[in-house]
């Protein structure tokens, strides 16, 4: 089974989700949530990770974080590992608390940071655990409104400054922004690229250098491996001759990893025709 692509670089922003093993609860009471937040704060400080939003549910949690020092894997190993040890010790259990590997999505900070923040704090409302976002005390919503500066888990000032430089106006705008998202059909993840990128092609192209070296790892899914490839319509744009078309077919398949079926459907020809073209020796290199 293909494992998720892990891209780490300085200043990367991630939406993180981690679920309980077998979808079991990872918090059995409020003491567990308090403990988790204490551990989260310690690891944020230790690894200089910035947190913009969080929400603790019952069998999973959400984080929106930035890694100025390119250390996501180390941070997450410590966060989940220390909590697992504490949880098992408290309840006299052994084994995994979290289900396999956490899920990380790279977020275009300039265009999607606020939307992801809103998505995260609205999780309890969407799950019908509460009617209003302010009723769930285990998310970053209240901390953002309070704009706590000392000892806070989140960087609320950055979020509020995205709305306005005057603090009262910014808080009011943030509250209204979150309120507008209540009851709306979530379309955020429909914008996801290759399952791990929340951003447009320019964003993915801009960070390509950070994961290109991973492109030959067989465990990484084909979809993620070719995340930066151009769409077929761009590859074949302006093609006028059959020779030029055939060269583009070879380029699409050999360099960009498109399947014969995908190429055939784009050109409105059978995939066997594409296969015959590729067998021509002049297009194999």
Image (cartoon, helix red, strand yellow):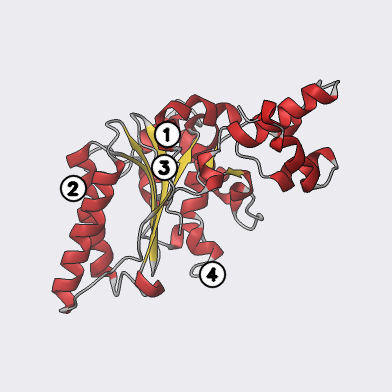
Q: Quadrant of residue 250?
A: top right
Q: Quadrant of residue 256?
A: top right
Q: Which residue is mark 3?
A: 14
Estimate the x, y position of residue 52 in percent, counting from the top left: 38, 41
User: Can the viewer see residue 150?
Assistant: yes
Q: Which residue is mark 1?
A: 211
Q: CA distance from mark 3 to mark 2?
A: 19 Å
* Element on which disc 3 rests: strand
Q: Is residue 39 above or below residue 6?
A: below
Q: Going from the N terminus, do you reach mark 2 or mark 4 first?
A: 2
- Left-right relation of 76 to 42: right
* Element on which disc 2 rests: helix
Q: Going from the N terminus, do you reach mark 3 or mark 2 first?
A: 3
Q: CA distance from mark 1 to mark 4?
A: 38 Å
The circle on residue 42 is: 2
Estimate the x, y position of residue 181 in percent, counting from the top left: 60, 50
Q: Going from the N terminus, do you reach mark 1 or mark 3 first?
A: 3
Q: Observer-nearest residue: 139 or 267?
A: 267
Picture residue at 53% right of the left edge, 67% below the top? 127
The circle on residue 128 is: 4
Picture residue at 79% right of the left edge, 40% below the top? 266
Give the foreground label among 1 and 3. 1
Q: CA distance from mark 1 to mark 2?
A: 29 Å
């Amino acid at each position: 089974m293909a494992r998720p692509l892990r891209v780490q670089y300085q200043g990367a922003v991630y939406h993180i989700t981690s679920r309980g093993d077998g979808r079991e609860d990872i918090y059995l009471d409020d003491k567990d949530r308090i403990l988790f937040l204490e551990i989260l704060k310690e690891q944020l400080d230790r690894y200089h990770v910035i947190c913009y939003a969080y929400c603790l549910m019952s069998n999973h949690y959400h984080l929106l974080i930035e890694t100025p020092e390119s250390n996501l894997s180390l941070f997450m190993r410590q966060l989940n590992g220390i909590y697992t040890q504490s949880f098992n010790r408290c309840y006299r259990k052994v084994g995994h608390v979290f289900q396999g590997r956490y899920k990380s999505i790279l977020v275009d900070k300039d265009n999607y940071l606020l939307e992801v923040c809103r998505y995260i704090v609205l999780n309890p409302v969407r799950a019908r655990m509460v009617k209003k976002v302010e009723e769930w005390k285990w998310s970053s919503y209240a901390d953002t409104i309070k704009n706590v500066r000392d000892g806070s888990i989140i960087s609320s000032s950055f979020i509020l400054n995205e709305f306005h430089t005057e603090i009262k106006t910014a808080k009011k705008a943030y509250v209204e922004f979150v309120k507008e998202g209540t009851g709306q059909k979530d379309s955020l993840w429909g914008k996801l690229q290759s399952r791990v990128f929340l951003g447009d092609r320019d964003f993915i192209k801009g960070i390509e250098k950070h994961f290109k070296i991973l492109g030959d790892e067989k465990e990484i899914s084909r979809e993620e491996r070719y995340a930066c490839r151009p769409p077929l319509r761009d590859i074949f744009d302006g093609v006028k001759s059959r020779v030029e078309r055939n060269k583009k077919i070879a380029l699409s398949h050999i360099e960009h990893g498109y399947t014969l079926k995908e190429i055939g459907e784009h050109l409105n020809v059978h995939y066997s025709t594409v296969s015959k073209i590729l067998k021509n020796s002049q297009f194999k290199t």
